Image (cartoon, grey):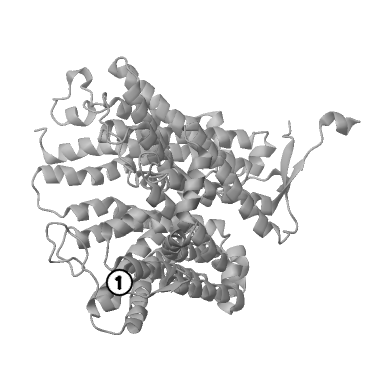
Amino acid sequence: MRSPVRLERRLEQPKWLNWVVPLASLVAALILGALVLWITGKNPFDVYQRIFERGFAGKRAFSGALEMATPLAFTGLCAAVAFRMGLVNIGGEGQFYMGAVGASYVGISLGGSPTGITIVLMCLGGMVFGSVYAAIVGVLRARFNTNEIITSLMMNYLAAIFLNYLIFNSKSFWRDPDSPQFPKGKTLNARADWNTYSIFGIDLPIAFLIAILAGSAVWVLYKRTRFGFEVGVLADSPKAARYAGIRTTSTIVIVMALSGALAGLGGAADVGNFRGLLDAKGIQMAGYGYTGIVVAALARRNPLVTVVVAIFIGGLTKAGYALQGPDFPSGLVGTLQGLILFSAVAGEILIKYRIRTTPRRSEVVA
Amino acid sequence: MNSNIFIIVIASAIFYGTPLFFAALGGIFTERSGVLNLGVEGTMLIGGVTGAWTCLHVGGSAWFTITVSILMGALAGGLVSTLLAFLCITLKTNQTVAGLSITIFAGTVGLSSYLANIWKVSKQPVPRPIRNLDVFGLSDTPIVGPILFHQTALTYLSWVLAILATIYLFHTRIGLQLRAVGESPQTADAMGINVVKYRYVHTIFGGMLAGVGGVFYSLAIVPLWVDGMTKGAGWIAIALVIFGFWRPSLALLGAYLFGALQSLGSTLKARNVQISGDLLDALPFFMTIVVLVLVSSRFAHRKLGAPAALGVPYEREER
């Protein structure tokens, strides 16, 4: 009893597949999404048209896409960096929160410093908090072989509780003392606001440029340095890495810290470039960390592509927020993102394997 | 006597631990066959929302409505995990990412929330919640009454399942073959066991149990549907599989331990004990990490470790 279709491992992976397959998975996801919409009594064309209009078409929509893409680029890079080593860091969410905590601490403290210095120091604050938080997961994994997937996820919940504590259940440094009735974060000094440039009428947040910079830096690190090479060896063959004398333990911790630093940078951008305060509810609702996993998977872990994919997913997310209402229920965009991730995962198979059809038995006999 | 705090905590630990155990037992079946299901959280949520919808729309006696709701929740969970099985077993994708994609697709801001919206079940109290029973009229018996005779029907079912699952896994031929599939699919295949079939069946059954766990949230614990109401229970269940060393009996104990941690907050608050709510909320997640670190040590793994082929797709050609 053999199935008529089987998968055969490709000996060589043609380069063009790396482009065609993700695009094809995107199309497949849209078709699956249309199916879900159609089954639940919505007009798929109508929904997609509105997503396109509100998410991408026109200067205002595209500005919105870039705004949303910025945190997603960072969380996408966070996931991609860890994936490259075979580590699954789904703690980007919590590391993002911690980054926001660190950066807003710096931002509130540095009342009158020049904007440029403030931006740099806030970025550092976010990176330090994010990377330390992620490094805990890395140490547990490296030292005790603890499953990093579950620990990093548990750390997300802990970070969320910590965030709520800071803003809602304590009189912390981050909380606005002038608003005891409606707890919210302390607003940053106006000079701590990060720049947003206007180019041809499109708002380009400086944090998006930082994201491009970070993506390029990761690309150089993984493609052009000894450390990147070692990470690659560790990912593909841990045994070979051990024989070659590559230090597994410290590399795991460093990669996790790097991954967390990127997410923390995203948290800093969220505070500095967009919200101007530590918005405990807002950043939990956004779920940038989880969406970043979708971004990284669709970008096939390539750091530069991650930034580009973030714009696409960013527009989709932005449209979801803008359109939310009775005939555009919340959860719809999340469902679409899930389908995109599915298709991206399933698409991987077409890069690794060739689909062969086995001839029918009668033909074989003949 | 029965208002003693220890008795209340134990009784509610069993209550809150029940959905964790259902999901963890599902995880045990799935992982014993060599498939890692990181989609438990999403699967539970889909089961929960389907159960709530069914309960709102199916009339009849309480028993009938609740039974149908549980079955529908199981069915929905089974469907979601069929998707996972297809990705992991047939397409041989990376099981970690496949499971994550299930949780993102079905999760808090995904399909479960979308369905809740279009089905209009959000925050609608279910007409027939799952109630604690008064078994043999013994619920007032000192000490054992609240703990043993005042639980939900699903809790009693879970005790039966724990026993049946232990017998199935360790004392039947099929169970032995299942473990062989999880340990060494090549050997199992050579013995004439259909690896693909074993993996599909147990992944789907595992998803059905996770779906039942979700129904327990929307019909018993709250009892109405709130988006993302499992709040990480699915992930704790995955940790419980590891914590329970892939054995139903230990997973049951673990589930009640975590059930106790979850119920501690509301119990203490009801007693006006001054303790930070945030600290109590953080306890289950913190303990999950602690427990995972403890059981990940090499010593524990030597005798009671994971199925050897866990997370590895089976490729016949590459024997």
Question: What residue would you read off at disc 1?
Answer: A102
- Asked if A242 appears above or below A53 in the picture, the reply is below
Q: Is residue A182 left or right of residue A331?
A: left
Residue A120 pos. (x, y %): 37, 80
Residue B17 pos. (x, y %): 30, 38
Residue B191 pos. (x, y %): 67, 35
**Neighbour tally class for label 1: few under 14, some 14-19, many 20 plus, Cα within 10 Å:** many
Q: Quadrant of residue A280?
A: bottom left
Which quarter of the rendered picture does the N terminus of chain A lie within?
top right
* Number of numbered discs overlaid on the protein picture: 1
Answer yes or no: is residue A251 visible.
yes
Q: Is residue B172 left or right of residue A135?
A: right
- Of residues B269 and A69, the one nearer the viewer is A69
- Residue at image point 79% right, 38% down: A358
Which quarter of the rendered picture does the C terminus of chain A lie within?
top right
Q: Quadrant of residue B28?
A: top left
Residue A200 pos. (x, y %): 48, 70
- Asked if A321 appears above or below A198 in the picture, the reply is above
| Element class at badge 1 | helix
Q: Amino acid at mark 1?
A: Gly
- Of residues A226 and A95, the one nearer the viewer is A95
Q: Residue furthest right?
A: A366
Answer yes or no: is residue B170 visible.
no
- Residue at image point 45% right, 60% down: A65
- Of residues A278 and A356, the one nearer the viewer is A278
